Amino acid sequence: MSVATKNAQDTEFRAGGTDISERRRSGVSTGPLLDIAVEPEMTSMLWGADGTLRIGAATTIAAIAADARIAAAYPGIAASAQGLATPQIRHLATLGGNLAQRSRCWYYRSPEIACLKKGGSDCPARSGNHLYGVAFDLGPCVAPHPSTMAAALLAYDATIATDKRGCLTMAEVFGDGSNGAADNALQPGELIKGVELPAPMAGERALYKRAISRTHAEWPLVEVCARAVVKDGTFQFIRLTAGGIAAVPLRLAAVEAALQGKAANAANIASAAEQAVAGAKPLPMTGYKLDLLKGVVQDLLQRLAG
Ligand SMILES: Cc1cc2nc3c(=O)[nH]c(=O)nc-3n(C[C@H](O)[C@H](O)[C@H](O)COP(=O)(O)OP(=O)(O)OC[C@H]3O[C@@H](n4cnc5c(N)ncnc54)[C@H](O)[C@@H]3O)c2cc1C
């Protein structure tokens, strides 16, 4: 699917306002602003009789983090919401806004500097300071995707319901990173109505962990959401997704392949964790993220196996 360029003059929504307000203050976003009319459907959590869940897009991150039923059924979603930003931000920030938030790259956020996401012809971070940039270089823009919830939802095979196109897969919304001009493939004025989660698997557990440059109030350098069903000492199901390392939330398929059906022992976990960097292409300043990624993956796998 092609990913559209988003222009500064496009209409944008204000949900919690924690991202858009800053971009408007700085002049990076200048188009018309629509406050989201909060219909009950947009703020509710609807559980299906088959164990599925639909979370309205205007549900706050704090509400997701505090929901005991989500913590029981989708612990990776709950833990990701709990680990994100600060209590103040989580109280305002919504699920839809989290998924559609724009890049945190300091070049993009500067009104004085042109970049691919603002109609420029190249990525100034690639030749400039990209310390917090990608370690998997998938396209022309080297900023990692900023959404913690996107990485968690990818681990759960969630779909995203919009007002214009019905249910979209995560890949349809976030693309493959090859287009540096936008953070997602939502069309201008396309509203996320909610997120739909399949029923969890019997006996599954999940964990989330982030490596961060200070203890709170920061986007992670690397974050991983891991789900597993460990039965009779073997990984009967394993799923890992990561944020902070690529222009899109990334599935760590090589780690999954290394562990699926294998004994959940230290040797298998250590060698699978090495596979977390399969396909990585770090920039001159982002090689450190590969060690962080391997370390976070190994820790999560050990805890899921234990
Ligand atoms: C100090 C700090 C630390 C942070 N750390 C993290 C972190 O670790 N992980 C993380 O993921 N985020 C982090 N954030 C970002 C924060 O989570 C986002 O700003 C927030 O989730 C955005 O949600 P919102 O409802 O406030 O969106 P808004 O600011 O209202 O909107 C953001 C964008 O989303 C679009 N939008 C909003 N709702 C919808 C919708 N329903 N459909 C379509 N488009 C929509 C708007 O058009 C706008 O472009 C941090 C923020 C701060 C200030």
Image (cartoon, helix red, strand yellow):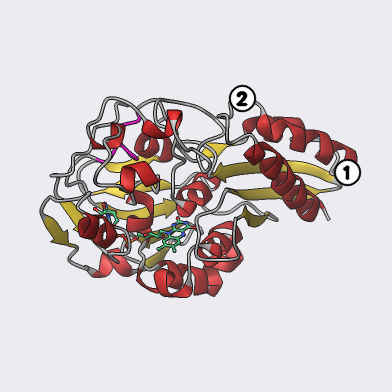
Q: In which quarter of the image is residue 37?
A: bottom left
- SS type, badge 1: loop
Taking the spot 51% from the left edge, 47% from the top edge, the residue there is 151
The percent coordinates of residue 65 (x first, y second) are 50, 69
**Kind of residue sitting beneath label 1:** Asn
Q: Which of 22 and 90 is in front in this view?
A: 22
Dominant SS of magenta comes to: loop
State yes or no: Cβ of the residue under disc 2 lies below 8 Å from any atom of ligand 1: no
**Kind of residue sitting beneath label 2:** Gly
Ligand 1 shown in quarter: bottom left
Taking the spot 74% from the left edge, 45% from the top edge, the residue there is 295
- SS type, badge 2: loop
Q: Name the residue under label 1.
A: 265
| Up/down of 173 relative to 24, above or below | above
Residue 204 lies left or right of residue 247; in this view the side is: right
Q: Quadrant of residue 259?
A: top right
Taking the spot 66% from the left edge, 27% from the top edge, the residue there is 278
Q: Which of the marked residues, 1 or 2, is nearer the chain's N terminus? A: 1
Residue 205 lies left or right of residue 98; in this view the side is: right
Circle number at residue 279: 2
Location of the N terminus (image quadrant): top left
Location of the C terminus (image quadrant): bottom right
Q: What stretch is highlighted in magenta?
A: 180-186
